[in-house]
Amino acid sequence: MAVLASRRGQVLILAAIGMAVLLVVMTLVLNTAVLSEVHVAQTDESTNHERSTLQYQDSAERAIGGLILSINENQPAYEDRAAGLEREVEAWSELVQPEYERDGVVTNVSIDAVYFEANTTILHENASRSFTSNESATDWTLADEADDVHEFEMNVSDEYLVETNQTNECAGGEDCFAIEAEGANGEVWTMYAYMTEANGTVLTVEQSGGSMTTCETDAANITAGTFENEGCEEFTPFTHEDESLTSPYTLNFTNADRASGEYELVVEKVVTDDDRYASADSPRLDKTIEAADISVTYQSVALTYEREYRVEPGERDG
């Protein structure tokens, strides 16, 4: 009987030990499951904030790219464009912020710097105004020492044109309106605009070597070497390699009160805005915003994100 009692005691002890081990194992399994769920929950929350951060940054980049394009197109005075972009970006940042505040997130985007293209456009869009400078100078420099001229188109009305019968009268000192392109080597290329009783408006190009090309027309693409009248012979632009002018180029108007109409040219130079040009009338400068440096902030309980980078409109297209 003592032996049986001893064996029963050993079995009970072993069973108790087994139960204890089982309970420990179950506790470890349950704790591991709980810890795993907590970890997964924390990871999901962080991932959601990271995803929301990237979405906010992407929205800001697209919005600012669109604002740059809009301001370049709709703000006529280029000197107001940088300040205008800053105001519009600030307004966008304030507009979207409440959406994130509901989730306890603080957001902000701001402009650090604005960059304009190296090229400068010079415009004359008031067709009723003569081609004089903003100060009404009749002989003036439209652009000096430009490394290149990428575009130059002109339409001339006959309101102020000198009437003459011979092209050489313009070249010989008649007060005809003229565009003079002077190269760094001193060579000069000239285009005259005048009227004849028989043919109306006439444009004549005098190459630096002295040869002339004349056309009965009131418009020309000067950098392309073509007149609007397709029946006319093409001419050699002053920027062409066959011309003897070397860059940089200086463009002068003479007798500018003897012509009116419209023109647009793009020069490879940052032209200084001075009294020669008007603010929003003609002639005026036009400089396009090329890019902007921005600062983006996204701050939540789980994440603080700050980044500075450059936005260029259209770079994400495609």
Image (cartoon, rainbow, N blue to C red):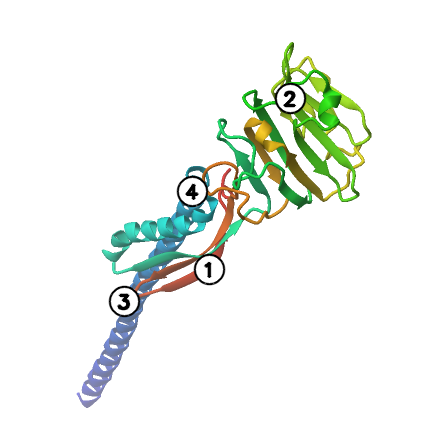
Residue 234 makes an appearance in the image: no
Image disc number at residue 118: none
Mark closest to the chain's N terminus, 4 or 3: 3
For the residue pair 204 and 196, the one nearer the viewer reads as 196
In front: label 4 or label 2:
2
Residue type at mark 4 is Ile
Compute the Cα span from label 2 to label 3.
Answer: 92 Å
Mark closest to the chain's N terminus, 1 or 4: 4
Residue type at mark 3 is Val
Left or right: 79 with respect to 22?
Answer: right
Residue 50 image point, x, y percent: 38, 57
Image disc number at residue 71: 4
For the residue pair 10 and 146, the one nearer the viewer reads as 146
Mark closest to the chain's N terminus, 1 or 3: 3
| Residue at 63 percent of width and 32 percent of height | 255
Q: Residues within 10 Å of mark 1 (few under 14, many from 20)?
A: some
Mark closest to the chain's N terminus, 2 or 3: 3
Residue holding disc 2:
194
Residue holding disc 1:
308
Residue type at mark 2 is Tyr
Mark closest to the chain's N terminus, 2 or 1: 2
Residue 272 image point, x, y percent: 57, 49
Residue type at mark 1 is Glu
Q: Residues within 10 Å of mark 4 (few under 14, many from 20)?
A: many
Question: Are the residues tagged 1 and 4 within 8 Å (C-beta)?
Answer: no
Task: Give the answer, above or below, for where 37 lies relative to 66.
Answer: below
Compute the Cα span from label 4 to label 2.
Answer: 38 Å
Residue 302 image point, x, y percent: 32, 65
Task: Give the answer, above or below, for where 226 lies relative to 90.
Answer: above
